Image (cartoon, rainbow, N blue to C red):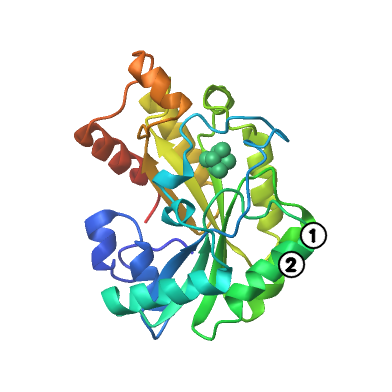
């Protein structure tokens, strides 16, 4: 239900940020301090291995946003153990959400997926899972498997969208279009799984108006979360080549902050 100032007072973080930070959400939903542990379960991505395309999204280098990719590959259980130790010692976290972050975490047969997810969920301190994936990699069978965990656990799917504009998705070689994204979201909304959508501000060739169109499109979906990034250029990517050739520019901090503020203004509070 849409709230109004007269129906109940706005929480301080809404007055400050105009959005509901995930850490506040976790505080309000759990009696314990909950942190996400990033997991690299050994999957690859159809946009890199040739099934959809090769080379991947032009900005993609998983090492830049997924720390585990650089390390020797470890069983999921061991990654959870190490993650728990780190987050307990450093942040005082007590319970955990296993975040299947690296590459495309629904890109395998159903038995492999089940065994990976359940290896994480078998840890008594794991209260949920969050599964990062592409919108063209989610079958109804996979949705039904993941939905089955919602009875006992806190469950999210994180869909990479980045932009609602197909011309931009082609420009960054995403390998899917907005129609596939909308289809995945609508099918997921028939389940009890929480949905988070990833968006990038400052993608090549996008105007401010186009970025706000993405904001409006995502705001109208009735999903539970958004992860907003600014575009950054990582070494050894196709985007880096374009950047050094002067074909792509990045936002400075003030421009990004202004856009992020405008992005969240499209959302009612
Ligand atoms: S979908 Fe994700 S893992 Fe695959 S190429 Fe794009 S950013 Fe990389």
Where residue 254 appears, as percent x and y from the top left, is: 20, 35
Q: Which residue is mark 2?
A: 145
Distance of label 1 from label 2 (alpha carbons)? 6 Å
- Tally of marks: 2
The foreground one among 115 and 180 is: 115
Q: Are marks 1 and 2 in contact (CB under 8 Å)?
A: yes
User: Residue at horizontal 50%, vertical 29%?
Assistant: 58
Where residue 52 appears, as percent x and y from the top left, is: 70, 33
Quadrant containing the C terminus is bottom left
Residue 266 shows in the view: no
Residue 216 shows in the view: yes
Q: Quadrant of residue 179?
A: top right
Above or below 152: residue 206:
above
The foreground one among 123 and 26 is: 123
Above or below 121: residue 251:
above
Where residue 67 appears, as percent x and y from the top left, is: 41, 54
User: Residue at horizontal 77%, vertical 61%?
Assistant: 110
Answer with left or right where residue 260 lies relative to residue 145.
Answer: left
Mark 1 CB lies closer than 8 A to ligand 1 = no
**Callout 1: few (<14), some (14-19), or many (20+) C-alpha neighbours within 10 Å?**
few
Answer with left or right where residue 16 lies relative to residue 209.
Answer: left
User: Residue at horizontal 73%, vertical 35%?
Assistant: 51
Where residue 7 appears, as percent x and y from the top left, is: 36, 69
Answer with left or right where residue 100 lies relative to residue 86.
Answer: right
Q: Quadrant of ligand 1?
A: top right
Disc 1, SS: helix
């Amino acid at each position: 239900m849409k709230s109004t100032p007269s129906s109940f007072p706005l929480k301080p973080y809404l007055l400050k940020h105009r959005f509901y930070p995930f850490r506040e959400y976790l505080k309000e939903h759990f009696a314990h301090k909950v942190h996400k542990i990033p997991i690299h379960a050994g999957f690859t991505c159809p946009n890199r291995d040739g099934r959809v395309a090769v080379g991947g999204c032009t900005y993609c280098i998983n090492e830049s946003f997924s720390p585990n990719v650089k390390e020797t590959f470890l069983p999921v259980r061991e990654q959870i153990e190490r993650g728990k130790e780190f987050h307990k010692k450093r942040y005082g976290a007590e319970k955990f959400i296993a975040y299947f972050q690296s590459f495309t975490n629904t890109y395998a047969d159903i038995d492999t997926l089940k065994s990976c997810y359940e290896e994480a969920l078998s840890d008594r301190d794991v209260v949920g899972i969050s599964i990062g994936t592409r919108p063209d990699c989610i079958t109804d069978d996979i949705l039904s498997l993941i939905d089955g965990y919602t009875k006992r656990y806190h469950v999210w799917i994180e869909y990479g969208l980045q932009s609602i504009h197909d011309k931009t998705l082609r420009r960054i070689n995403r390998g899917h279009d907005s129609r596939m994204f909308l289809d995945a979201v609508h099918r997921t909304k028939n389940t009890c799984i929480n949905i988070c959508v990833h968006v990038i501000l400052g993608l090549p060739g996008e105007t401010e108006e186009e970025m706000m169109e993405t904001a409006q499109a995502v705001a109208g979906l009735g999903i539970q979360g958004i992860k907003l990034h600014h575009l950054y250029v990582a070494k050894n990517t196709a985007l880096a080549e374009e950047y050094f050739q002067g074909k792509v520019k990045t936002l400075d901090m003030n421009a990004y902050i202004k856009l992020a503020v405008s992005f969240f203004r499209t959302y009612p509070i």
